[in-house]
Image (cartoon, helix red, strand yellow):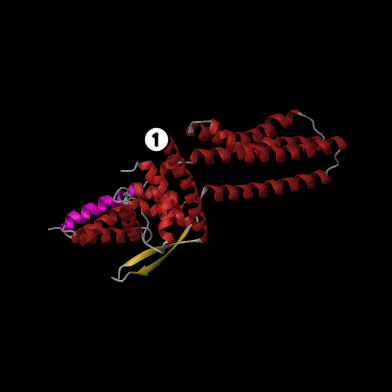
Amino acid sequence: MFDLEQSITDWRRQMLAAGIKTPVPLEELEIHLREEIEQRMKTGLSAQAAFNLAAERIGHGNQLNDEFVKAGGMNKMKRRKLAGCFYAAILGVYMLAATCAMFKNDLSAGEWLSGLAAQAALLLGSGLIWWSGPRFFPLIGSRRIQSAAGLLGGISGAIWFVVFANCILPRFDFTTGQLMVAVLWAMVPTLVLPTMAFLLLEKSENRPATAVGI
Amino acid sequence: MITKELVAASTEPLILSLLAGGESYGYALIQEVKRLSGDKIEWTDGMLYPVLHRMEHRGLIKSRWDESGTGRKRKYYTLKKDGKRAMARHHAQWSLVHSLLAGLRKEQYV
């Protein structure tokens, strides 16, 4: 004997197992299911046939959950703005600290000029990548390559600084001023490469506009 | 029947336009689209809800829980100011495509 309430309870269990959250959106889906069953039964269908049809029309839990996860995610513009603010804050703190360090150390005019040039290169480099990078990234067609290039970009920024500090710096006998300027220049790729990495990874995550699963 | 891609692309403007006529809930929206399209547009029932949630996250619509006349709890959706603006944009774009297609078709028969 078909038990409608038991079937709905089993259906709920399947949806929960697929990752659909309760009470929202599972409750909303269950209300829809019950409404559809009721309407189908009014047309003369048996409770079992009405339930089967209504459950089929709602769809598979896994597919639904994928769509809900996408719907709940932060939208691209918001995420980009937030990442932009975060990056600008890091850059601001770094540049303030670097300028303070330049003032504290006794730099020659040439070292001052070079230090300021490094700061300008950092601002220009990250700004250029942030604003114009997304226009060129679509040229990298494959999402896998975009994602790999992004990861590589992020890691290589950190690797470069480690190599610089451990392998390049010890080979030179820098004065304090020269050391300061060398570090400032070394920081340019260290901070610029992660910008490119973020944009590439973000690009590789985007799905085509037709992905609305309706 | 209309292609899946066109159905997907038209979902948001259709929801916005339906809600412009007053608040509604998922099941009613599906039935209304089915009726108005003469059964030519049929949404996969469950997939409407992630779209509604996405539109709510984007600030186009808002929702509230209430009880229907039959005592059943329902989640009602209403259009927000940004949703009205998005609807106007959609209407302008779809009208442009429609008039372009109509013009091209007319040219073929002249």
Q: Amino acid at mark 1?
A: Tyr
B54 with respect to A35 (left or right): right
Quarter of the view holding residue A200: top right
Outermost residue, front side: B110
A200 with respect to B70 (left or right): right
- Considering the numbered disc 1 on the image, is that residue within a helix, a strand or a loop? helix
Quarter of the view holding residue A120: top right
Residue A36 screen position, x and y as percent: 26, 58
Visible in this render: residue A67? yes
* Residue under the point 33% across and 60% down: B28
Outermost residue, left side: A1
Outermost residue, top side: A171
- From which residue to which does the magenta span run? A45-62
For mark 1, does the 10 Å Cα neighbourhood hold few (<14), some (14 to 19), or many (20 or more) residues? few
Task: Please give the chain letter of the residue carrying mark 1.
Answer: B
Which residue position holds label 1?
B109
| Viewer-nearest residue: B65 or A70 | B65
Position above or below: A37 against A156:
below
Is A53 in the magenta? yes
Is B94 in the magenta? no
Main secondary structure type of the part rendered in magenta: helix
* Residue under the point 33% across and 51% down: B37
Total marks drawn? 1
| Viewer-nearest residue: A169 or A214 | A214
A118 with respect to B47 (left or right): right
Residue A157 screen position, x and y as percent: 63, 36
Q: In the rendered image, which quarter contains the N terminus of chain A?
A: bottom left
* Residue under the point 35% across and 46% down: A63
